[in-house]
């Protein structure tokens, strides 16, 4: 069901999700407007990944409503495909196709899903590799790239589908410290260009400089959400304060 | 006991002639068996019970019984049935060559289906998720992501299967055919020199094994170009 009346780009209403008898999301409400950047943090196992994976239907929520750019996520295959066209996703483990070069990784979905001819797809791929500053790596295989380069290829691969929304699930957690910055820089540029973004990360520097809203999750719930300056300086909940004191001290 | 080394060399050319039949049996069974295996593995992983159960049962039966029994059942067993002898299929089924091809192909299919299933399961789940997130359909993901990676993962085990099939073809000497082993047996019956003759046969088999290993190593290099940094 299309629902164009909702102003929010992404709307979650009392979303629940269980794995067997374990409830990983216990009624999550979240509204994100076009162009907003949301940073999600919280302890491991608190449901951050589950929440953003529900937004592009890698997980199926079992209660509540999720509306993405006017399309409600139901079991309709057509709607799921439509939502996936709007939403790009970047994973902690990059998940590049190892048997394809960087450029081929970028070209695959445009060619198969959007039926773009090979030559145009290649031009599109080169355009986005330039945007993530590694056009010279186009013909290398993922195994020949550093972690930071791989993650930038993965970002470019998502951008090739021209999504309206980008989801990032701990994009820098698998990286060596010296490579984190090159990936965050690309994400900051993307944010400046107006992309709607949800970023699960513990990079609080990134949250401070880029986020419109910081969301703290614990135990399957959103405990607190606020603009970064409020979030970091006047967190209300004890759980948030405890979490912040742990991650900000190192 | 007297051992004549020269007999080994003298019998080699004759035995090598038997290798032609061995190779034909081997290659044809591999091709038919592998094509059948592709269908079987798709059925097996389809998640649809009426497809996956027959595939499971088939694989269980053909992996769980000796190849020799399978060859005998097809060559001697099917000939017992009047309706088979009366049917047009009899043109094929009365030939030991085609009976062997059928038995070997069916057997290879069962093993190869399991090998491919292992390869498919070895493909990182994260790649499926990336494909789904990019909007690729199930069949697009299978063709463009899963299959090429699964093939590479399956190659070493498939190479072993090629070698064991090659050795398995020796069974045709028991159904009147003159492959390497069949030829060796007839020479032995004439010369009563089992050591020399079968050493000679072993040399020819080792030569074939070496060729198979080379071919597999080549394929592995081709399919793993991207793995080496
Ligand atoms: N596929 C799954 N099957 C069973 N349990 C899961 C699955 N995915 C996540 N969980 C559980 O759900 C909870 C939330 O997981 P997740 O969303 O990955 O947390 P986070 O990303 O915040 O670390 C965890 O307790 C995790 O063990
Ligand atoms: Mg997570």
Image (cartoon, rainbow, N blue to C red):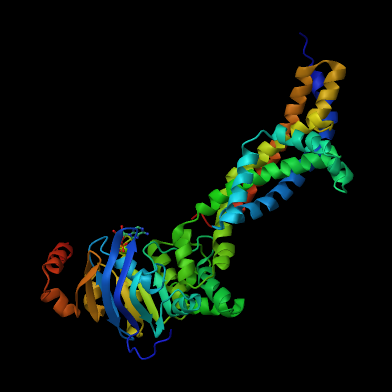
| Quadrant of res A20 | bottom left
> Does residue B12 appear anywhere in the picture?
no
Q: Determine whether, in the image, residue A6 is placed left or right of residue A156.
A: left
Q: Position of residue A244 (x, y in %)?
A: 15, 67
Q: Is residue A8 left or right of residue B6?
A: left
Residue lying at the far bottom of the rendered structure: A5
Q: Taking the image as four quarters, which one is ligand 1 found in?
A: bottom left
Instruction: State the residue in front, A71 or B38.
Output: A71
Instruction: Please tell me whether residue A54 is drawn above or below residue B73 in the rendered image.
Output: below
Residue A68 image-quadrant placement: bottom left
| Residue A12 vertical placement versus B103 (above, below) | below
Of all residues shown, which one is farthest toward the top?
B1
Residue found at the far front of this picture:
B82
Residue A94 in the image: above or below residue B150: below
Q: Relative to A180, say whether A231 is above or below.
A: below
Q: Quadrant of the C terminus of chain A?
A: bottom left
- In the depicted view, which residue is nearer to us: A214 or B219? A214
Residue B51 percent across, percent down from the top left: 61, 55
| Rendered image quadrant of residue B64 | top right
Which residue is pictured at 74% across the width and 45% down the height? B29
């Amino acid at each position: 069901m299309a629902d164009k009346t909702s102003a929010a780009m992404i709307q979650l209403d009392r979303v629940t999700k269980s794995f067997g008898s374990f409830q990983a999301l216990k009624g999550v409400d979240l509204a994100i407007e076009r162009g907003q950047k949301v940073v999600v943090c919280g302890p491991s196992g608190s449901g951050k990944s589950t929440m953003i994976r529900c937004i592009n239907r890698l997980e199926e929520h079992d209660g509540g409503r999720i509306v993405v750019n006017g399309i409600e996520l139901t079991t309709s295959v057509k709607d799921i495909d439509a939502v996936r066209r709007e939403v790009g996703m970047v994973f902690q483990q990059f998940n590049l196709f190892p048997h394809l070069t960087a450029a081929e990784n970028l070209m695959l979905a445009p060619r198969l899903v959007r039926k773009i001819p090979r030559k145009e797809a290649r031009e599109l791929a080169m355009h986005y590799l330039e945007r993530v500053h590694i056009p010279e790596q186009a013909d290398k295989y993922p195994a020949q790239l550093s972690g930071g380069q791989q993650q930038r290829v993965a970002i470019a691969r998502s951008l090739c589908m021209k999504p309206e929304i980008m989801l990032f699930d701990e994009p820098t957690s698998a990286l060596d410290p010296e490579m984190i910055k090159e990936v965050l820089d690309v994400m900051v540029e993307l944010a400046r260009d107006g992309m709607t973004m949800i970023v699960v990360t513990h990079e609080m520097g990134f949250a401070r400089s880029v986020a419109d809203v910081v969301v703290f999750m614990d135990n399957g719930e959103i405990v607190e959400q606020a603009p970064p300056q409020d979030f970091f300086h006047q967190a209300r909940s004890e759980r948030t304060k405890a979490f912040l004191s742990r991650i900000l001290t190192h | 006991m007297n051992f004549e080394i020269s007999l080994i060399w003298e019998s080699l050319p004759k035995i090598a002639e038997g290798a032609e039949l061995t190779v034909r049996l081997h290659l044809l069974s591999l091709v038919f068996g592998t094509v059948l295996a592709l269908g079987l593995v798709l059925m097996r992983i389809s998640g649809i019970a009426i497809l996956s159960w027959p595939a499971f049962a088939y694989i269980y039966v053909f992996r769980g019984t000796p190849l020799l029994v399978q060859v005998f059942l097809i060559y001697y067993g099917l000939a017992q049935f009047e309706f088979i002898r009366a049917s047009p299929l009899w043109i094929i089924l009365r030939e030991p060559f085609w009976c062997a091809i059928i038995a070997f192909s069916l057997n290879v299919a069962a093993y190869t289906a399991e090998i491919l299933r292992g390869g498919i399961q070895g493909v990182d789940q994260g790649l499926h998720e990336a494909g789904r997130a990019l909007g690729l359909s199930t069949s697009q993901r299978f063709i463009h992501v899963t299959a090429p990676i699964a093939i590479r993962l399956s190659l070493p085990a498939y190479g072993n299967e090629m070698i064991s099939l090659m050795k398995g073809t020796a069974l045709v000497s028991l159904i009147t055919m003159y492959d390497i082993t069949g030829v060796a047996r007839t020479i032995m019956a004439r010369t009563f020199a089992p050591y020399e003759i079968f050493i000679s046969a072993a040399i020819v088999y080792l030569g074939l094994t070496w060729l198979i290993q080379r071919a597999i190593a080549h394929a592995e290099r081709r399919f793993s170009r991207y793995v080496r940094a």
